[in-house]
Image (cartoon, coloured by chain):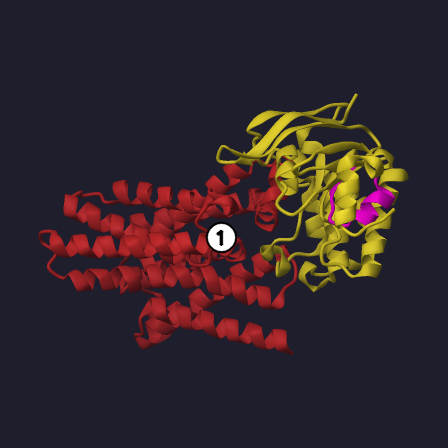
């Protein structure tokens, strides 16, 4: 089969579409997260979601999203909406919550193995690395990602100037009357939703990479916030497409291939910056 | 009527007061320098005036048509800002954010105001440049232009010359003095530089174990002032 033949397959088309949308959303949010020293929040929140999933499995909930989503949103709000005045600083609190929920989740899954799921390490592996889940998407999941991406992009466009003001100088924005608590809350909720949904699709390893790499690559080359945002989105989408096509053609793991593409893009941008 | 008046303020963190019984007024056209030793609560006072913190007791009132969100603020630089990828124009324009409410985009008037203040701070050639590539003095001018977008009446400056070399420091003081005298903008400044405070300010607020608030001339003869000046090795 050639690459063209693969592209005729509906599951490959779905993977491309969802991959591009997730990459787009993650990179848009990534710029503000990286600048606020919250690069690891993608990793942290996906571990929180993992812990919540374990609890849901142990409790025998059929629809685990009912538990996972609120818990993750709560943690995101706790981390981001606290702002720079929290007692435990950003990186430390992300690390704490991330490692804590990963450990508790794994412990629970071992103590109370959910019935019908004997393969715990397989489960964990899929959650972390995404496995093949992006190639086995249901139509409902595809529509969900489309809807979500529209919301995220619209949010980013309409709140662009507010996101900039809050990211650059939270105190100044607050002092001049911007409703920074509201904006921080909205950003936190959106990030939590994006991470939970994309973790199901592509795994938690990939989602952190999608948040961090495009933003850092764009910052190497461009000098204004607008250029950086647009460039990060472009880099992220191009890397996602390249990664998925390469993975389909050569049978490599999708998530890791996209991350390698992102690393390559970062290398190229660093080179451009040096020249 | 006073532009800003603080009535019997008690400030502190988590119920513990670090400053008590602060009362003073700032009138239109004043140039008030807040002095005092490290840890005496200067920055806490400024955050309270800006509404970023609540006082334990007492009130901060704005008057003369000044609203709480019309105070221009020049904060000390944060770590985040030092390597921030943003152009000078983007940063100055963000000074208009406070008036935006939920409107998503800036109006023509906002943009015109941003350019006006960029010209006023003489940083027009830098407008397209990246903030992180500027010198310390240039960065301060950018933040001052942003503060001017947020206010037409009152500027709050938190150690505006910290980390600047002597020549740039002098230019910065001149710039602020011009804004005060020529444009009639009221200035409240935290300063460690007593000499400059005495030269440029019209009023001094000294906080710490003893509190003084009043005109500069009287400060030089007050008990608080004499004591503090002597300890600083400064003789008028």
Residue beneath the point at 60% across and 43% down: A171
Q: Colour of chain A?
A: red
Q: Is residue B60 visible?
A: no
Residue A52 rendering spot, x and y as whole percentages: 26, 48
The quarter holding residue B12 reads: top right
| Residue shown at 48% from the left, 57% from the top | A27
Q: What is the drawing colour of chain B? A: yellow
Q: Nearer the viewer, residue A47 or B89?
A: A47
Q: Hey, which quadrant is residue A99 in on the image?
A: bottom left
Q: Is residue A231 visible?
A: yes
**Looking at the picture, does residue B144 appear above or below residue A181?**
below
Identify whether B84 is placed above or below A160: below
Q: Is residue B231 left or right of residue A90?
A: right
Q: Nearer the viewer, residue A197 or B60?
A: B60
* Mark 1 closeness class: few <14, some 14–19, many ≥20 residues within 10 Å: many
> In the figure, is residue A67 to the left or right of B214?
left
Q: Quadrant of the N terminus of chain A?
A: bottom left
Query: What chain is tagged by disc 1?
Result: A
Image-based side of A101 in relation to A206, left or right: left
Looking at the rendered structure, the secondary structure element under dot 1 is helix
What residue range appears in magenta?
B187-202
Residue A227 percent coordinates (x, y) = 62, 59
């Amino acid at each position: 089969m050639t690459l063209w033949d693969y592209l005729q397959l509906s599951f490959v088309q779905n993977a491309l579409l969802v991959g591009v949308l997730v990459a787009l959303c993650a990179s848009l949010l990534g710029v503000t997260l990286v600048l606020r020293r919250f690069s690891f929040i993608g990793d942290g929140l996906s571990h929180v979601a993992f812990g919540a999933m374990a609890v849901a499995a142990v409790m025998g909930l059929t629809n685990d999203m009912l538990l996972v989503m609120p818990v993750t949103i709560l943690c995101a709000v706790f981390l981001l909406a606290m702002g720079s005045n929290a007692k435990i600083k950003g990186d430390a609190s992300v690390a704490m919550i991330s490692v804590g929920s990963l450990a508790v989740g794994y412990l629970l899954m071992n103590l109370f193995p959910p019935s019908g799921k004997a393969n715990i390490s397989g489960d964990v592996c899929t959650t972390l690395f995404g496995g093949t889940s992006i190639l086995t998407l249901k139509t409902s999941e595809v529509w969900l990602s489309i809807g979500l991406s529209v919301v995220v992009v619209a949010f980013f466009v309409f709140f662009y100037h507010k996101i900039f003001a809050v990211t650059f100088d939270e105190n100044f924005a607050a002092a001049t009357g911007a409703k920074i608590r509201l904006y921080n809350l909205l950003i936190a909720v959106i990030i939590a939703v994006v991470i939970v949904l994309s973790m199901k699709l592509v795994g938690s390893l990939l989602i952190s990479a999608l948040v961090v790499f495009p933003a850092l690559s764009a910052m190497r080359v461009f000098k204004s916030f607008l250029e950086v945002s647009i460039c990060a989105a472009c880099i992220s989408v191009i890397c996602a497409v390249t990664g998925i096509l390469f993975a389909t053609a050569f049978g490599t793991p999708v998530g890791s291939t996209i991350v390698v593409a992102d690393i390559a893009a970062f290398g190229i941008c660093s080179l451009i910056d040096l020249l | 009527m006073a532009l800003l008046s603080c009535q019997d303020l008690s400030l502190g963190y988590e119920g513990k007061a670090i400053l008590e019984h602060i009362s003073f007024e700032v009138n239109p056209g004043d140039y008030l320098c807040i002095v005092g030793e490290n840890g005496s609560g200067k920055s806490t006072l400024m955050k309270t005036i800006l509404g970023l913190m609540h006082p334990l007791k007492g009130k901060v009132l704005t008057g003369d048509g000044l609203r709480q969100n019309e105070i221009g603020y020049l904060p000390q630089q944060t770590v985040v800002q030092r390597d921030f990828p943003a152009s000078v124009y983007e940063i100055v324009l963000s000074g208009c954010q406070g008036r935006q409410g939920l409107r998503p985009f800036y109006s023509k008037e906002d943009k015109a105001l941003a350019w006006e203040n960029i010209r006023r701070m003489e940083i027009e050639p830098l407008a397209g440049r990246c903030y992180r590539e500027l010198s310390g003095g240039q960065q301060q001018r950018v933040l001052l232009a942003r503060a001017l977008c947020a206010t037409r009446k009152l500027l709050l400056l938190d150690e505006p010359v910290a980390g600047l070399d002597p020549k740039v420091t002098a230019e910065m003081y001149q710039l602020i003095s011009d804004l005060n005298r020529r444009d009639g903008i009221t200035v409240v400044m935290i300063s460690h530089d007593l000499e400059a405070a005495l030269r440029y300010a019209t009023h001094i607020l000294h906080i710490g174990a003893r509190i003084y608030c009043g005109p500069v001339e009287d400060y030089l003869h007050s008990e608080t002032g004499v004591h503090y000046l002597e300890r600083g090795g400064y003789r008028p």
